[in-house]
Amino acid sequence: MSVDLGHVSVLGAEAVGQPGQRRFRLFAQSVRGSAVMWMEKEHLNSLSLALDRFLAMISEGQILRTEARAGKSPTPKGMPEGFPVHPTYEFQVGQMKLNYDEQEEMFQLSVTPLEIEMERGREPQISMRDEDAVSFFFGQVDAHELSNAIAQVVVAGRPVCPLCHAPLDGGPHACVKQNGHREILQIEEQEEEDEDEE
């Protein structure tokens, strides 16, 4: 049976671990319970882009995506202190559905868990647990804040190649879009320090 958390009072995203080995999660909490939903970075970023499209349509272009830039963005806030150590629901995300109710002016996100069954000598069996889907509601302000939080989380890791979007690890990068013929070097921008002493 699917779960409806209702209107959430806490909603955010964060990455856990070091760049290159990070795991990504969405977290939500209401009076009905709490949920931690683990997913791939690409899925988290896709959610951010979907929220931005909805917000741009709803506001007729007045709310637009703010691009976060590595090294220039504030550190993502992450999970608040009071969030339960053992959430009511915690799972790997298999599918997400985002809807917007115009009358209520609320977003609804429905998240379906992914189940992976491992048996010896057999290929892993992957299935969606539709009956255990978790859904919740949040407003436009929450949607905008969540989108910005996701953008900050995504850019806080390793920079990516502007052509093939593969992570850059600091060394030369043979880009597949260039058929490996041209190396793309990382250039780190550092803010100039004011050397004037008064």
Image: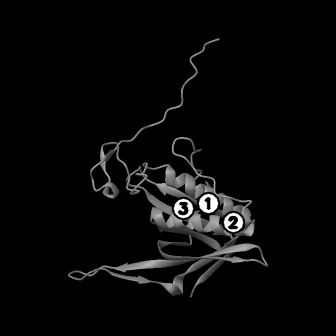
Q: Residue 147's x, y, as percent?
A: 62, 60
| In this view, the mark in front (3 or 1) | 1
**Residues at circles 1 and 2 in contact by the CB criterion of under 8 Å:** yes
Identity of the amino acid at label 2?
Leu
3D distance between C-alphas at marks 3 and 1: 24 Å
Work out whether mark 3 precedes mark 1 in sequence or the reverse, and give the earlier one: 3
The outermost residue toward the top is 198
Identity of the amino acid at label 1?
Ser
Horizontal relation, residue 167 to residue 60: left or right: left
Identity of the amino acid at label 3?
Val
Read off the residue under disc 3: 85
**Residues at circles 2 and 3 in contact by the CB criterion of under 8 Å:** no
User: Mark 2 Cα within 10 Å, few/some/many (few <14, many 20+)?
Assistant: many
Horizontal relation, residue 166 to residue 148: left or right: left
Which sits in the foreground, 84 or 98?
98
- Checking the image for residue 147, the label placed there is 1
Read off the residue under disc 2: 55
Q: Look at 52% across and 41% down and name the residue there.
A: 71
The outermost residue toward the right is 103
Q: Secondary structure at mark 2?
A: helix
**Residues at circles 3 and 1 in contact by the CB criterion of under 8 Å:** no
Q: Residue 52's x, y, as percent?
A: 63, 64
Work out whether mark 1 precedes mark 2 in sequence or the reverse, and give the earlier one: 2
User: Mark 1 Cα within 10 Å, few/some/many (few <14, many 20+)?
Assistant: many
3D distance between C-alphas at marks 2 and 3: 32 Å
Q: Secondary structure at mark 3?
A: loop
